[in-house]
Amino acid sequence: MPTITAGSTPQTISLSEGQVLNISGVVGTAGVAYRLDPVLGGTNSLQSWTIGAGALAQIGPYAGLQRFLVTCSAGRVDVSASNAVLNLSSGGAAGSIPFSAAVPLGGGSVVMEKKVVSGALTFVPSGAISGGVCVAEMLADGVNAPSFAAFEEHSSSSGWLNTAGFTNLVQFFCIGTRNYFSVSQPLVQGAPDLTPPTVASAIVAAALPGVLSVGFSEALASGFVPTASAFTVDGHAVTAVALRAAFVDLTVAPAFVSGEAARTAAYVQPGSGGLRDAAGNLVASFSGRAIANNAGMLVTVPAAPTAVAAVAGNGQATVTYTPGADGGSTITGYVATSTPGGFTGSGTSGPIAVLGLTNGVAYTFTVHAVNNIGNSAESAPSAAVTPAVPAAGYARFASLVNTTESGSADPYAYTGNGTAFGTAMGGIATKSRVVGTDGSCAVVLGAATDATHEAMLGLDNSATPVGYTSLDYAVFAPSTGTYRVVVGGVSTAATVAVSCAVGDIMRLSITGANLDAQVSKDGGMTWTTIYSWSGISASAVKYHIQAAKSAVLTASQIVGAA
């Protein structure tokens, strides 16, 4: 179930039959929940509830599936669903006394706390008086069937259902001097819930330094609120406890302040009244839960990035930017978006490649940052750039699987582990091609280089593919992330250090008697020479395109060639 923040898209929630909806807001929250009309559809509603600070009364249960629309115009709304807790007796509230195998039948009607059976149970009457009634709701474990030997089974009883996770409703009552029990099961029982809630967070909000909110993995049953003594907070006294859907709000004294020492929280499960979910699964004791102290801090969405610029490539663009302030919450990523087309690229840092663009169309780009609070505003747009096919300057390979160049077709051949050009590589795909008419050939990096993806462009006189130790000249995009060259079969640092990035083009270009290893980061418009050899002849030489990956290599895993 979602958390909805101010200004975010309203959320549509589906509520199954027999479930209830739990909705709560932090201080300053404003929102509305609508129960949608199943006949008229759309946003037509049958009921609505105004959401403010604190928890609403549980909504539901209903017969049949229900849909709700929840909005938030200020603050934050937390929504969860849980199974309805049945009121088992008209004479008392569910959970009005702790669970006990000594059944109190001293007059009137009482209801015990829900019990998850986990061991032997033998029920006996206690203080029985004619007219006394006690009701217990128990979840079977499939192993330990309780003993009712001290009671007579009433004719209305359907018997104990000892199926793990299923609910049995047991009513004990005294008539005259005879003590009876009767067992029944709800008509509708969903999949058994045997998973207890677990602690998920402990946060002091900037606006509420006197409250520690402990979050759990699911909504908690509202009828079970432990005393403050069940909780311990380092350096602070717990003075009050309140439940709010999947949160326990602990009022503490003194209030938290910015910059105080790291604190932890602990909980000891009490003998009765302990935290639990609607199925009766108890929250286990925990200690050492680190507290995120935001007291005195204003946590917001990030500031928009600035200085956005783009460089066009072939069907793509590379976008750079200057990050803005993180809003007090660590930035988890950036998203670049094109106009027109809405093409996007993302990353945890820049630059960001945006692919799928149409050559010849002018694009601008905006960037927004993302943190745990939400998205920043979009940046100001970049200047327009126009992707294009680079001017002719090297032979082009249209695909990795079956390519056509100078009128010939020649597929890449996977040569297996034996010819791997990197010691960590499990195999290579390689192609031997005649040199381009201008004396150059190039490879585009279609994936980030890492321990399992590398690419190499080599040059020699062999008519068939060879391993890298047989190459005298090559440019290499290795897992280290900085381009290298191969000189006489040995991996060698380039003269000019250039980092590898998706969309880069690396090429070998022959000019006269010189061979240059070059890299382009703008789609082939400009080139950086990272290493040069002399004394090279352009006649009768072959290029070798190689891409490597550990284990079995398939065409879809090969770094792209241009």
Image (cartoon, helix red, strand yellow):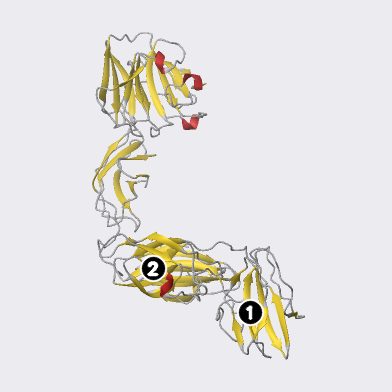
Q: Which residue is found at the position 28% from the left and 8% from the top?
A: 535
* Quadrant position of the C terminus in the picture: top left
Whether residue 36 sits left or right of residue 212 in the image: it is right
SS under mark 2: strand
Residue at 40 percent across and 26 percent down: it is 455
The percent position of residue 203, horizontal first and vertical second, equals: 36, 63
Q: Residue 120: image x %, image y %?
A: 66, 68
Relative to 479, does residue 243 appear above or below in the rendering? below
Residue at the disc numbered 2:
232
Q: Nearer the viewer, residue 107 or 451?
A: 107
The residue shown at (28%, 22%) is 494
Q: Where is residue 213 in the image (x, y as percent from the top left)?
A: 38, 67
Q: Quadrant of residue 289?
A: bottom left
Residue lying farthest to the right in this orientation: 155
The amino acid sitting under disc 2 is Thr
Residue 339 appears in the picture as rendered: no
Q: In which quarter of the image is residue 452?
A: top left
Give the labeled residue for mark 1: 102
Amino acid on which disc 1 is placed? Ala
Residue 85 placement, left or right of 539:
right
**Of callouts 2 and 1, the N-terminal one:** 1
Q: What element carries label 1?
A: strand
- Answer whether labels 2 and 1 touch (C-beta < 8 Å): no
Q: Residues within 10 Å of mark 2 (few under 14, many from 20)?
A: some
Vertical arrangement, residue 475 with respect to residue 48, above or below: above
